[in-house]
Amino acid sequence: MAFIKNISSTASDDELVTQYKATGDMKILSDLYQRYMELVYGVCLKYMNENEEAKDCVINIFEELITKLRKHEVTHFRAWLHQLAKNHCLMKIRSNKSKPRKVNHEFVHLDENVHLNGVLEKEANFERMEYCLGQLVAEQRQAVELFYLKENSYKTIAATTGIAPDKVRSYIQNGRRNLKICMEKKALENI
């Protein structure tokens, strides 16, 4: 069992999803969820406006994840989890529509605001990256995703795609440059 713990701490999201689906091991799911709890909390706080409600949602989303992850085909766990959190919060807001909402920001500490700003900035960067990946030429997008997100080597990418290794390197370099330009442009648009 100690061997699985070591694997799960260094395994990719896709490997952990596959391991969890195969075994149902809650430790694996917990390790995977821990990677993105700050992101989920940031999403929940954005929609719920109260720390305690957001914390409750983070727990409820984990509980949803136990069954939903086994039912759905998930190719990009982080993006899928982000959408799951967003949908959960929107459903909670709809179900609470008739209840009056109070927002009290007096007791929010400066360090919590700084932390939340960091989480929200990460979320904004992630959304820009998702958009900009979609704007890349198909070969560049594929090479960048396989290299950076799936952590494959040039050699592995070349073998799985049939693209020559020097072309793989070129697609990655050009894709990274184009991704950076697009993300900087999108960041300026949002200021």
Image (cartoon, rainbow, N blue to C red):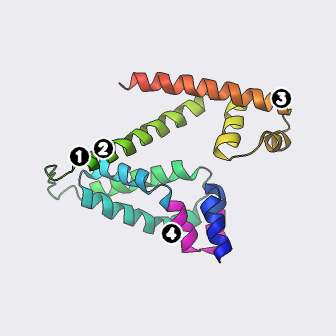
Q: Taking the image as drawn, is residue 17 in sight?
A: no
Q: CA distance from mark 1 to mark 4?
A: 34 Å
Q: Specify the segment rendered in magenta.
A: 18-33
Horizontal placement of 169 versus 114: left or right? right
Return the disc, 1 or 4, that comes first in the chain's sequence.
4
Q: Amino acid at mark 2?
A: Val
User: Is 91 above or below relative to 131?
Assistant: below
User: Is 64 above or below relative to 156?
Assistant: below
Crowd around label 4: few <14 · some 14–19 · many ≥20 (10 Å):
some
Residue at mark 1: 110
Q: In front: 152, or 72?
A: 152
> Are the residues tagged 3 and 2 within 8 Å (C-beta)?
no
Q: Quadrant of the C terminus?
A: top left
Percent across and percent down for residue 164 are 86, 32
Residue at horizontal 64 percent and vertical 75 percent from the top: 2
Element type where label 4 sits in the image? helix
Residue at mark 3: 166
User: Is 57 above or below relative to 166?
Assistant: below
Q: Amino acid at mark 3?
A: Asp
Q: Quadrant of the N terminus?
A: bottom right
Q: How many marks?
A: 4
Report the disc number at residue 66.
Answer: 4
Residue at mark 2: 114
Prevailing SS of the magenta stretch: helix
Percent across and percent down for residue 174 are 68, 24
Q: Taking the image as drawn, is residue 122 in sight?
A: yes
Crowd around label 1: few <14 · some 14–19 · many ≥20 (10 Å):
few
